[in-house]
Image: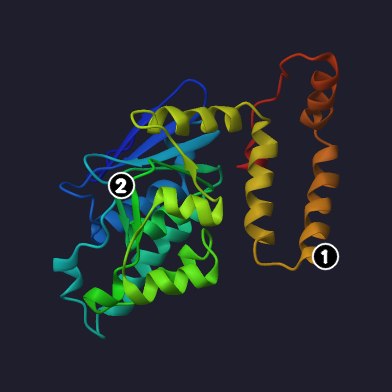
Amino acid sequence: MADYQYLKTEAHPNGVLDVRLARPPANAVDRAMYIEIATLFRDPDALLPDLQAIVLSGEGKHFCAGNDLDEFATMTPDNGDERMRRVREAFFAIQDCPVPVVGAVHGAALGTGLAIAASCDVLVALPDARFGLPELTVGVMGGARHLARLAPQAVVRRMYFTGEPMTAQALAEVTGAIVLAEPGRLLETAHGIAARIASFSPTAIRISKRILNRVEEMDLQNGYTAEQACTVRMSGHPDSKEALKAFKERRAPNYLPLSDEFR
C-alpha cells in the first residue's frame, strides 16, 4: 500500500478498496491533502490490482467539513490559480476514477466535503448527515455545480445563497440521489453496494464508468448513441456472452480478469 499522510486505505478480497479521509479533527482539506486525493484516485490500481470499486468515507465525527480555512485565508490572486487547480484536480480524479466510487457520508459534508461526496458515483449517508455550501459565509465561491449532480437547481440556489445545510434525509426526499443508511450501518450499507458492483464483469465496469461520465452532459439521442457503441464493443468480449449464459442458467458468472487494455 502507498504511504499517504491524510488518507487511509484497506483492500478487501472481493476487489473493494476502502479509502478514508483522515485529517483530524474534521477532515478539512489543505493543498497537500488535495494532491494526495488526486494521486490516489488517478491510479487506484496501484493499491489493489483486482480493483472493482472504492468506498470513500471519513474518519472521526465528520466526512469532511470543507477547506482548511486557515490555509484558504492565505490565498491571493498570485497563488490562487495553482491552489484552485489542486482543488479541481482532486474532485475530477474522483469523478474520473476508473472504477465506481461509493461515498459514505456521516456528520458534515460542507463545501469541499459536499463536492467530494457529489463526485462519487453512488452516495450513501446517515439520515442526520449534513450537506451544505457555506461558501458565501466565508467569502468564497464554488460547489454549486457539484451539488447540481444531487439536487434540482431550485434547491442548489437556496442552499448556496443561504449557506444553510440540509440533512441527508431532507435531500433524499427531494432528489432520490442519496441512499439512506440506518444508524450504525453506514459502512455496511456502502460495502453492500460496492460488493454488488464488484460482482459484475471487471471489463464491463470500467467501460460503463467511462461511458457514464461521457454521456452525463449529452442530450438523450447523442448519449444513447454513445452507449450503443459501447454495447457493440462489449459484445465482442467473452464476458458479455458469459453474463447472458450465467443469467439463463441461474448461476454465478465466471468473468475473465481485467486486461491491461481496459485499465
Q: Is residue 145 left or right of residue 244?
A: left
Q: Which mark is residue 221?
A: 1
Q: Residue at point 65% right, 26% down?
A: 257
Sequence-wise, the earlier of marks 2 and 1 is 2
Q: Callout 1: helix, strand or loop?
A: helix
Residue of label 2: 63
Quadrant in the picture for the C terminus: top right
Is residue 154 or residue 232 the one in the foreground? Answer: 154
Q: Is residue 203 left or right of residue 148?
A: right
Q: How is the image coloured?
A: rainbow
Q: Which mark is residue 61?
A: none
- Counting from the top left corner in percent of width and height, residue 166 is at 37, 58
Quadrant in the picture for the N terminus: top left
Q: Is residue 237 left or right of residue 114?
A: right
Q: Residue at point 72% right, 18% down?
A: 254
Q: Amino acid at mark 1?
A: Gln
Q: Callout 2: helix, strand or loop?
A: loop
Q: Residue at point 33% right, 74% down?
A: 162
Q: Residue at point 31% right, 66% down?
A: 164
Is residue 121 or residue 254 the one in the foreground? Answer: 121
| Up/down of 88 relative to 169, above or below | below
Residue 219 seen in render? yes
